[in-house]
C-alpha cells in the first residue's frame, strides 16, 4: 500500500504512540492520522467515530478501500467494550476530550493518546484519578505548542518526587526531561501574563509559572 499521507508534527507525534493492532480515532475529520497508520502498516484496522455528518463524509472518503470502519456517533458511545486496543483524540479542546473520556469509562481501551489544543492539565488530573499512568509526554511546535500525552491503564509513577500541583499543571515528564520547548512555553506564558490586569486569577497563574521556571532552574546542574 503506497504511503502518500503526510502528517504535520503534532499528528506525527500522536501517530508514533499508536500501537493498535486495532485502533480507534475519535473525531477524525479528514482522517489523515488513521490513513497514515494504515498506509504504514502500523495498525491492522481502524475504527473512526465522527459526530458530525460533514467530517463523517470526509473520513469515509479518506479511508475508502482501507481496512477501516467509519461510524457516525458521539465519542465512545459508538464503540463496544474491548473492541479496540488503543484510542486517539486529537485537535480538540481538553474539556471536550475529557467529556468524551468520561462519557463511557468501561469502553476505554488500555492505551490512550491525547493531543489537546489547549492546556493538558485537566487530562493529567483525570488520568491520575481514573487509574491511567502517564508513560510519555511530548511537546511539539506547530501553530501553537502542543502537548501529546500517552496513557496506559495502571499505576502512575510519573509524579513521584515532584511538586504535584506544578507537575499536574505543566507535565511531570516534561519537567523531568527539562524539555526545551517547556522552558520556551513557560517564558511565553509569563510574558503574556505580565501584560494582563493584575486580577487574582492572573497573579495565581503567574505564581505557578514562575514556580515552574524556578524548579527548572534549581534542578539544572
Ligand atoms: C478539529 S477536528 C480534529 C480532527 C483531527 N483529529 C485532527 O487532529 O486534526 C475535531 C473533530 O472532532 C469531531 N467531534 C467533536 N465532538 C465529537 C464527539 N463527541 N464524538 C466524535 N467526534 C467528535 C468534530 O466533528 C471534528 O471533526
Image: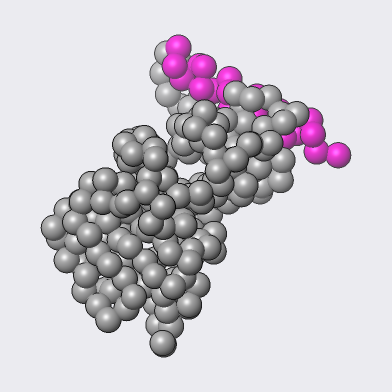
Q: Is residue 81 visible?
A: yes
Residue that sits furthest to the left in the current view: 53
- Residue at image location 67% in from the left, 37% down from the top: 158
> Residue 6 at x, y = what percent?
42, 74
Relative image position of residue 102 (x, y in whole percent) = 36, 35
* Whole-percent x, y for residue 217 in the image: 75, 33
Q: Is residue 63 rendered magenta in the image?
A: no
Taking the spot 47% from the left edge, 36% from the top edge, the residue there is: 123
Front residue of 123/64: it is 64
Residue at position x 48%, y 78% from top? 40
The colouring scheme, among rainbow, by chain, secondary structure or one colour, is one colour
Q: Residue furthest bottom?
A: 2
* Residue 21 to residue 72: above or below: below
Left/right of residue 200 with respect to residue 64 in the rendered view: right
Residue nearer the viewer, 76 or 164:
76
**138 left or right of 11 in image:** right
Q: Quadrant of the C terminus?
A: top right
Q: Does the rendering let one see residue 191?
A: no
**Residue at 54% across / 34% down in the picture?**
131
The magenta region covers 200-221
Is the magenta region chiefly helix, strand or loop?
helix
Quarter of the image for the N terminus: give it. Answer: bottom left
Magenta span contains residue 210 = yes
Query: On screen, 191 above or below 142?
Result: above
Residue 86 image offset from top left, x and y in percent: 46, 56
- Furthest residue in direction top, as rendered: 200
Left or right of 171 in this view: 163? right
Amino acid at each position: 500500500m503506497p504511503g502518500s499521507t503526510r502528517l504535520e508534527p503534532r499528528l506525527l507525534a500522536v501517530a508514533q504512540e499508536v500501537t493498535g493492532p486495532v485502533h480507534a480515532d475519535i473525531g477524525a475529520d479528514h482522517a489523515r492520522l488513521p490513513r497514515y497508520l494504515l498506509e504504514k502498516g502500523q495498525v491492522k484496522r481502524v475504527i473512526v467515530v465522527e459526530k458530525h455528518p460533514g467530517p463523517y463524509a470526509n473520513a469515509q472518503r479518506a479511508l475508502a478501500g482501507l481496512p477501516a470502519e467509519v461510524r457516525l456517533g458521539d465519542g465512545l458511545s459508538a464503540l463496544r467494550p474491548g473492541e479496540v486496543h488503543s484510542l486517539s483524540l486529537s485537535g480538540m479542546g481538553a474539556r471536550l476530550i475529557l467529556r468524551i473520556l468520561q462519557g463511557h469509562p468501561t469502553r476505554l481501551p488500555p492505551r490512550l493518546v491525547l493531543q489537546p489544543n489547549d492546556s493538558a492539565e485537566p487530562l493529567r488530573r483525570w488520568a491520575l484519578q481514573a487509574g491511567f499512568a502517564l508513560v510519555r509526554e511530548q511537546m511539539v511546535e506547530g501553530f501553537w505548542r502542543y502537548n501529546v500525552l500517552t496513557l496506559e491503564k495502571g499505576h502512575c509513577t510519573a509524579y513521584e518526587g515532584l511538586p504535584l500541583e506544578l507537575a499536574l499543571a505543566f507535565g511531570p515528564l516534561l519537567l523531568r526531561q527539562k524539555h526545551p520547548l517547556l522552558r520556551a512555553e513557560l517564558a511565553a506564558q509569563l510574558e503574556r501574563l505580565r501584560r494582563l490586569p493584575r486580577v487574582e486569577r492572573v497573579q495565581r497563574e503567574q505564581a505557578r509559572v514562575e514556580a515552574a521556571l524556578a524548579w527548572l532552574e534549581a534542578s539544572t546542574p
